[in-house]
Image (cartoon, coloured by chain):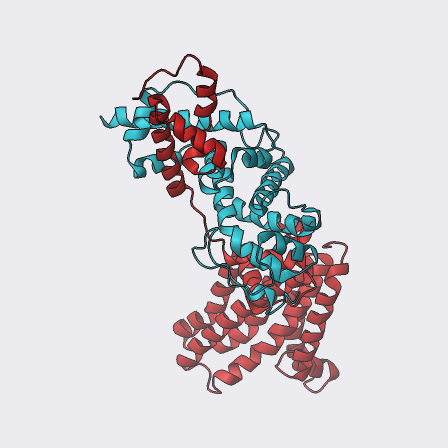
Amino acid sequence: MTPLVQPAWLLDAPVGATSAAPVDVDVDADTDADLVRLMAARDETALAALYARHAPALLGFLIATTGNRADAEEVLQDTFFAAWHSAARFRGDSRVRTWLLAIARRQIGARRRRRGLTAAPLGPDDDWPDTAAGPEDVALTRAGAVEVAAQVSRLSDYQKSILSLAFVQELSYHEMAKVLDIPIGTVKSRLNSARRALATLLTRTGEQGG
Amino acid sequence: MMSNEPSPRQPDEHARLRDLLAGYAAGTLPARERATLTEHLNWCSDCVARLAGWRAIAGGTRTALPAVTPSRDVLDGIRLRVSPSAPIGPSVLLALVRAQVPLVRPQIWSASALVLSLGVLVTLVNHRGGAALMSLVAPIVAAAGIAFIYGPENDPSLELALATPTPARLVLLARLTIVVAFDLGVAILASGGVVALGDAPDGLGQLILQWLGPMLLLSATSLWLSVAYGPLPATFVPLTLWAAKVGIAGIVEPLSAAATIATTLSSTNAVTVGVAALIATAVLVQVPHNERLA
């Protein structure tokens, strides 16, 4: 392998990059897993490439979860630092994005413990069974995209984080359970909780507006 | 034909599939479950309505919580942490200097600017005396500012800063650069003002040379005392030395040794600049081993 072609840290994440953005890093690695293996061998170019591919999406999740960009960027830094050191233990059982998100979630927990916060970092495991479709679902389907997005922003951080994992990070239920270290049933319950809260917000907004 | 009620034979299956609708809307279900749910949606109006709700949530979430490009500082910070011994580029240094600006006591900026502007004010009011005042106050004002740039007494966040991989001497160097550059800039501007008002017949260059050497020497002395003993000695010792220099000039024989030393140290020459550089270098080398700071 000849991975090093230019100074690793001259490489920027492309502006507006998303998870699918092409990476302008000429490393001999086609997949994320290859990059992690190179990173385990202390190849900083691989770290830069992995950062370019995943940092924007991770930061979106972290902002949703922590509630502010400054904290999110600090956790993002902690996440890639931890990934650098644990790359040798990556077995390839999951997607690299899932692995990074799990590290990010642990870093949030560690950060909260350092600050003396003992509450569950990503919300309670309330049982929120899905129920029959009702007026709240009508509110959801009738609302415009802009209105729904506005109400998503008003959800709690833990509700936004589960929605981010499901619809922005596009993780499966199994992957979400792995990232959050909770049972799949709890993942579904949290999604239902977020849906119910969102529908309630939309219903109230509709009542106030109407 | 759709029905609002699931088949009595399949209530558990309906509940199971209903719990998968979020994944269906996200497009993350495995092919087999997706096919089963697609078939289920052909007859279950309850799930069709619910799926529309999940699709609205999916769209709203993607709009409200998009991917965000991190600031460049994040990448630089990771670089410093994974390879602290790697060469540090200009962008990293720039980011470091920028990060130190809010950590420098704000009084340093205002006090330096205010006192250094006095030279211009005196010239404006009195038509003379501004150049002499500039030469007198510029060195000691700069030294007093340097006394407060670093150390546990001056920076509540120092403990955190020292826990990061950024070398302590780099942090000190960054702050030194900011404050010295600011003092130099303001002093040069003020000197320019004094010259423009006609109070410095020898010109701007000569006026700057009157205060530059002493400013660097006293600032370096203040830096050493601040790092070694704290801000109070770093303020009063240079002040005392400077006052002594002014006093000596008035009471000793012009050609005596004391007068020669005082004259040498109160102008810009190889001795003042060289000694200042030596002291500053020694401080930067010593900082990582300083028990008060490391």
**Horizontal placement of B210 versus A130: left or right?**
right
Q: Viewer-proximal residue, A131 or B230?
A: A131
Q: Is residue B12 above or below residue A149?
A: above
Query: Residue placed at 74% from the left, 60% from the top?
Result: B288
* Residue B80 in view of the camera: yes
Q: Is residue B106 above or below residue B115?
A: above
Q: Percent position (x, y) of residue B206?
A: 53, 85
Q: Percent position (x, y) of residue A1?
A: 66, 65
Seen from this angle, which residue lies furthest top? Answer: B8
Q: In this view, does A27 lie above or below A184?
A: below
In the rendering, what colour is chain B?
A: red
Q: Which corner quadrant of the image does residue B265 belong to?
A: bottom right
Q: Percent position (x, y) of residue B2?
A: 31, 21
State the quadrant of the C terminus of chain B.
Answer: bottom right
Q: Percent position (x, y) of residue A98?
A: 57, 42
Q: How many labels does the image show?
A: 0
Query: Residue placed at 55% from the left, 76% from the top?
Result: B135
**Horizontal placement of B190 versus B77: left or right?**
left
Q: Which corner quadrant of the image does residue B228 belong to?
A: bottom right
State the quadrant of the N terminus of chain B.
Answer: top left
In the rendering, what colour is chain A?
A: cyan
Q: Viewer-proximal residue, B30 or B238?
A: B30
* Residue B148 in view of the camera: no
Query: Residue placed at 58% from the left, 34% from the top?
Result: A180
